[in-house]
Amino acid sequence: MIINIHKKYLLKKFLKKIFLSSLIFLILILIINLIEEANFLKGSDSNFLIPILLSALNAPSLLYEMFPFVFLISTQFFFIDIYENKEIYTLKQFGMDNLTILRFLTTTSFLTGIFIIILFYNFSSILKNEYLKIKNEYAKDKKYLAVITKNGLWIKDNQEHEIMIINADRIENEFLINSSITRLDKNFVITQNIVAEKVDVTNKEWILHKAIITDPDNKSLKYGKTNIRTNFDLERISNLFSDLSSLTYFDLLKLEKDYKAIGYSINEINIQKHRFYSLPFLLSVMTVIATIIMVYNKFKHKLLFNLFIGILFSVIVYYLGHFTNLLGENGKLPIILSVWFPVLMLLSLSIVGVIRLNEK
């Protein structure tokens, strides 16, 4: 009963540290993001509430990305607290050594991570989606729209003197396959219909292969190869679908089916999914690393030094994860390995420290 009471006390203390650390990170994110949004909207006709709204909608998604660092810092402050208050000695009297405390914190981190990916992730993605919708209204290039559905790729290209509606069955390398292009004037009157077997979109000057161009009088001409000028190239088309943080997990699964239907690469979706799966494990490993840092370095005498190590370590982990994800997207590493490699590496590094933890 006494041990259970102590575990409840430790759980409350640890969760409080996570909450306070999350709140601090959230406030910093809001301030920084507010400055960025205000700068983005500079010169627009928006009122002063729009930057605040955008910052609030985007903040949960940014905080989600920061949770590994939140858990590392929270664990450090947790140990600082129980040692400064001499609570560690009371815990040891009831059989809670360093390993027992570590197991308790790691389990708590893992379960909290499951809560985060099930509830917080989907909540933040819904807000992120609203954020992108509102921000698009003030973007200079909002007239250029694109979407992928089960009916293929759709693009609306609003040019100076005309509008083009572009549809393609699928994407193969740098080609749009079985494309149709409808050209309209500013009054939305059709001026031309184009059907092409494939379209090279490497540059903004698209090359149409085996094209049939039909005018409003239903007169058609066939071309082995012809060109049209657009505002899109392959890089820009790819970038339009890169912000997957605005999709809930189930939306992500639906988009994966749509991508497969048109032959579009699902590498980024697989990376996003495995980042979702790996988060509870990453949070647990970060808790282990923080415990090792604090216990091994006699934190009660080197508070600022250990906090600095924690922050530096967080930055290294962030850039390592970003680097391996890029390798996965570029095909240099298997997709699954590109996401899980930082977790496995950190776990491997911490094993030796965990084995000797009770000696400290």
Image (cartoon, grey):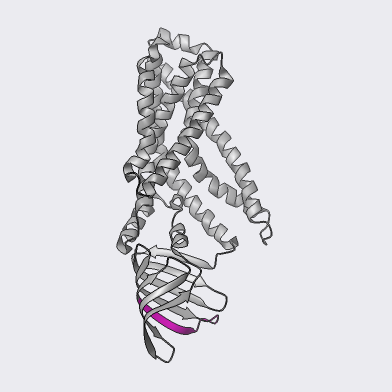
Q: Position of residue 300 (x, y in %)?
A: 54, 14
Which residue is drawn at the image coordinates 63% and 42% (left, top)?
Answer: 31
Q: How many numbered dots are placed on residues in this image? A: 0
* Residue 264 against residue 116 in the figure, above or below: below
Q: Residue furthest front?
A: 225
- Is residue 333 visible in the rendered image? The answer is yes
Q: Is residue 91 magenta?
A: no
* Residue 350 against residue 164 in the figure, above or below: above
Q: Is residue 193 magenta?
A: yes
Which residue is drawn at the image coordinates 38% and 25% (left, top)?
Answer: 349
Which residue occupies the foreground of this view, 67 or 248?
67
Q: Position of residue 320 (x, y in %)?
A: 44, 37
- The quadrant of the picture occupied by the N terminus is top left
Magenta stretch in the rendered image: 185-196
Q: Position of residue 296 (x, y in %)?
A: 46, 15
* Residue 27 against residue 302 in the figure, above or below: below
Which residue is drawn at the image coordinates 51% and 32% (left, top)?
Answer: 19
